[in-house]
Amino acid sequence: MDRQELTALMETQKQFFLQGHTRAASARIHALTKLIQAIEQYEHEISDALKRDLHKSETEAYITEIGFVLMEARHTIKSLKRWMKPKRVKTPITHFGSRSRIMPEPYGTTLIIAPWNYPFQLAVAPLIGALAAGNTAIIKPSEWAPHTSALLAKLITSVFPREHVAVVEGAVEESEALLKLPFDYIFFTGSTAIGKKVMQAAAEQLIPLTLELGGKSPCIVHHDADLALAAKRIAFGKWTNAGQTCIAPDYIYVHESMKDALEHELRKAVTQFYGEVPLEADHYPSIISDRHYQRLTAFLQEGTVAWGGQCDSERRRIAPTLLTDMNWQHAIMQEEIFGPLMPVLTYSSMEEVIQAVQAHPKPLALYLFTKEHALQQEVLSRVSFGGGCVNDTLMHIASPYLPFGGVGESGLGSYHGKASFDAFSHHKSVLFQTNRFDLALRYPGVKNALKWMKKVMK
């Protein structure tokens, strides 16, 4: 679509919104219900598209993408009327006789830009929030996952009129054209570098936005961790989607006394999950593109490959790999890995870890494995990160009761559950004043007004 067609599409959505079609609770619930029905109807096709784009297994596709958004949508429908109610707040004595309310209202026409790594989930989950809040939406899927992009367009077209929800396929040109339009809200998921460009484009038009970005998420394993269980949970978090997960553990900091044992347990977990030859496992995902594959294989020249490291360029597969003898000067430690390579660093005191993480941009996630409550509180209170888990990985993202988002370079704003509704809503403050009487003290020329106001305002 060219700029003129995109402008026309956005204008039809603005008119649809202004005519009030999306505002009633019944309309929002109806839209979400239709979305759920369509996802269930297209479940097999969604799985097939994810298989073709990323070689995801049917199980992984359902757990991390299809089932994820179905759970989110059902939770939203169940809670929506309560979220929509104006919230009563206290009124100060200076406003005696009045009532105060905070009223959530939709922004209007929203833009959702989705990435390629979870191309269905990360397009539909924000859409659930946009619909729940009463907005219209244009979704721009990633061109790097073309089969899922086409499936999204087909699914959305089957459910919604274009003036309510539309999918715009394409590449960088379409994204740049969309970012020049005067949307009322932008929701972007992707890299920090592109997020900066999106924020700059939004700033030029003063458009509010949410940025879900990434970063190097540490996984800290203390000497008292349950190693066998920790290894299984770390392996799950790292090698789901072949490490192409924004909140995947990016690197491990393990206590020096437990390094060898953890490496052994991690290898056992990988073998349990993917067999002796992970590259031949039908349920092990592929790397999204040749460019990304080449970038990752270049990292294999650094440090020491403790195990793994096998590659298949034809199928763009890299086996789960553990890299040791690493330090912060290596290239792999300078950027988010977004792949199945796991560097391992060691420490002797937790203070080393805290200072090292503090010295780098704030991560999207942090994972800490320890049974010591005081140590948990020490790390959680001193290290800033978007969200995370103690004695687990990834699972915080699956709770609709926990807002998900980054901080600093890892993101701006949060969503999931009520946080999605709040992200796509403007919270309007309204004072309802009484007409039964009028306090004269606020008006000019009232005798002793200052004296009385000082008393009241104390």
Image (cartoon, rainbow, N blue to C red):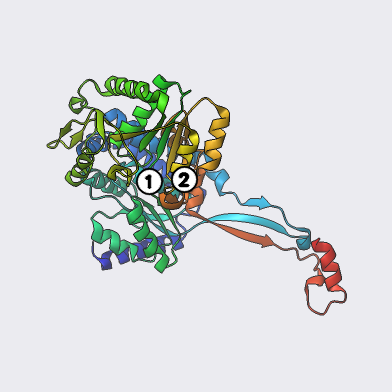
- How many C-alpha atoms fall within 10 Å of the one at disc 2: few (<14), some, or many (≥20)? some
Q: Is residue 426 left or right of residue 10?
A: right
The three-letter amino acid code for the residue at tag 2 is: Gln
Determine which of the numbered discs, if any, sits on residue 215 in the image: 1
Q: Secondary structure at mark 1?
A: loop
Residue 332 in view in this figure: yes
Q: Nearer the viewer, residue 232 or 135?
A: 232
The three-letter amino acid code for the residue at tag 1 is: Gly
Q: Position of residue 212 (x, y in %)?
A: 40, 49
Q: What is the C-alpha distance between the residues marked 2 and 1?
A: 13 Å
Which residue was labeled with disc 2? 358
Examine the rendered structure and indicate whether residue 97 appears above or below residue 133: below
Residue 249 in view in this figure: no
**Quadrant of the drawing holding the N terminus:** bottom left
**Quadrant of the drawing holding the C terminus:** bottom right
Examine the rendered structure and indicate whether residue 14 appears above or below residue 241: below
Q: Nearer the viewer, residue 74 or 89?
A: 89
Q: Quadrant of residue 206?
A: bottom left
Q: Position of residue 402 (x, y in %)?
A: 50, 39
Q: Secondary structure at mark 2?
A: helix
